[in-house]
Image (spheres, rainbow, N blue to C red):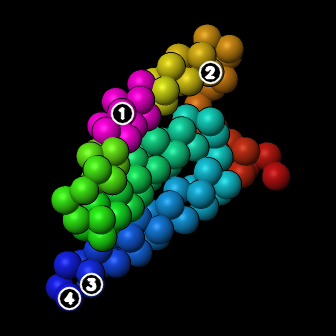
Amino acid sequence: MVIEYLSWIFIIIGSVFSIISAIGILRLPDVYTRMHAAGIGDTLALGSLAFGMMLQAGWTIVTVKLSLILLFMFFAAPTTTHALAKAALAGGAKPILEEDRIKAGENQ
């Protein structure tokens, strides 16, 4: 009974992180901060969701598969974010700095 409640707590935490990450992608101003929200938030969401599902599955082949998916994603997500950031920088995308936001506010 305790394991079931604990697994649902992790699943709910993962869902909350996923929603926060999605909101960050929509609300943040430039590509770099959006990548940060996607990379960190989705990794935390995936870790919590997978751990909750592992607790639900018990010691089965499903747990092994979820562990392999989790291991792959913990290596792939930061690598993908880094490659995307390098591509954005090479493509000329500039980060929005606080000074730029202040100047934009003065011009309006």
- Kindly state the secondary structure of the residue where label 1 is placed: helix
Query: Residue 87: where, in percent of width, then height?
Result: 60, 16
* Marks 1 and 4, the one that precedes in the sequence: 4
- Residue at the spot 30% in from the left edge and 70% down from the top edge: 56
In the image, residue 20 sits, relative to residue 91, either above or below, namely below
Instruction: Write down the region rendered in magenta.
Output: 68-79
Q: Nearer the viewer, mark 4 or mark 3?
A: 4
Q: Which residue is disc 3 drawn over?
A: 5
The residues tagged by marks 3 and 1 sit, at their Cα atoms, a distance apart of: 27 Å
Residue at the top extreme of this rendering: 90
Q: In this image, 22 relative to 41: left or right? A: right
- Residue at the spot 58% in from the left edge and 31% down from the top edge: 95
The residues tagged by marks 2 and 3 sit, at their Cα atoms, a distance apart of: 43 Å
The residues tagged by marks 1 and 4 sit, at their Cα atoms, a distance apart of: 30 Å
Q: In this image, 26 relative to 39: left or right? A: right
- Residue at the spot 49% in from the left edge and 27% down from the top edge: 80
- Kindly state the secondary structure of the residue where label 2 is placed: helix
Whether the magenta-drawn stretch holds residue 71 is answered as yes
Image-quadrant location for residue 82? top left
Give the amino acid at mark 1. Answer: Phe
Q: In this image, 58 relative to 86: left or right? A: left
